[in-house]
Image (cartoon, rainbow, N blue to C red):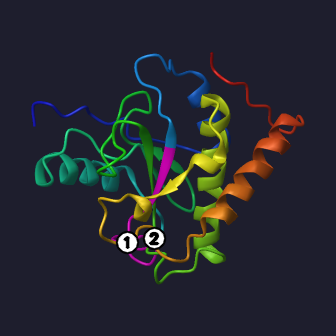
């Protein structure tokens, strides 16, 4: 597609992701909040080793060629890594009402059926909370502004699944932000 924005396609540990975000220039586009999704398909069971570079390339083909979108979500997060998909400094495509104003994060799993509180699901939750803490701190966002895709008035499906509890995620993000502010892993907002 001629208007395709391209992808980054690089994976990071939570600490590496924090460093990566500090290197970005947030001047062209600055999101107002973050929207959480889950992939549903593939599930955690369908990706026993999380995402690979080939999976990310296949997602690019899906969004660009099958969906005919100009971009995709900003991040894909599994139980091992945080994958940057659409550049964080441009708007993406992920939620009908909020594409132009929000970052979109896809979590690997179907949390309508898979457990988000233990095993691999818990690791997805922890990596997601770490990414959210970094993004909220750098962009000066209040964690309470985060939304779940199912809250979009133009969305008709339960995404992320019922296992994803918004207040638990917000609490974890706040805890991480406090820990980092206390010196364990400082995050400085980007001007």
In this view, 135 is above or below 96: above
What label sits on residue 119 in the rendered view? none
* Residue found at x 76% / y 42%: 177
* Residue found at x 46% / y 46%: 83
On the image, the x and y values in percent for residue 52 come to: 40, 55
The crowd level at tag 1 (other Cα within 10 Å; few <14, some 14-19, many 20+) is many
On the image, the x and y values in percent for residue 65 come to: 12, 48
User: Which quarter of the rendering shows the N terminus?
Assistant: top left
Q: Which residue is mark 1?
A: 40
Q: Which residue is mark 2?
A: 109
> What is the quadrant of residue 99 in the picture?
top left
The crowd level at tag 2 (other Cα within 10 Å; few <14, some 14-19, many 20+) is many
* Residue found at x 37% / y 71%: 40
Label 2: element kind: loop
Residue contact between numbered discs 2 and 1, judged by CB atoms under 8 Å: yes
Residue 168 shown left or right of residue 96 in the figure? right
On the image, the x and y values in percent for residue 5 come to: 25, 31
Which stretch appears magenta?
34-48
Chain-order first, disc 2 or disc 1? 1
Q: Magenta: predominant secondary structure element?
A: loop
> Per the image, is 47 magenta?
yes
User: Which quarter of the rendering shows the C terminus?
Assistant: top right
Q: Is residue 82 visible?
A: yes
In this view, 171 is above or below 75: below
> What is the quadrant of residue 183 in the picture?
top right
């Amino acid at each position: 597609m001629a208007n395709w924005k391209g992808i980054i396609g690089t994976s990071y540990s939570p600490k590496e992701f924090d460093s990566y975000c500090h290197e970005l220039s947030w001047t062209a586009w600055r999101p107002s909040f973050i929207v959480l999704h889950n992939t549903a398909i593939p599930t955690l069971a369908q990706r026993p080793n999380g995402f690979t570079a080939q999976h990310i390339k296949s997602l690019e083909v899906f969004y660009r060629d099958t969906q005919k979108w100009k971009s995709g979500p900003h991040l894909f997060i599994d139980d091992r890594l945080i994958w940057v998909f659409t550049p964080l400094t441009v708007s993406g495509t992920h939620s009908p009402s909020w594409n132009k104003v929000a970052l979109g994060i896809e979590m690997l799993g179907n949390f309508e059926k898979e457990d988000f509180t233990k095993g691999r699901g818990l690791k997805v939750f922890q990596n997601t909370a770490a990414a959210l803490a970094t993004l909220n701190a750098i962009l000066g966002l209040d964690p309470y502004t985060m939304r779940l895709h199912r809250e979009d008035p133009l969305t008709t499906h339960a995404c992320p699944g019922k296992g994803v509890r918004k207040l638990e995620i917000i609490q974890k993000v706040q805890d991480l932000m406090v820990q980092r502010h206390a010196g364990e892993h400082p995050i400085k907002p980007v001007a």
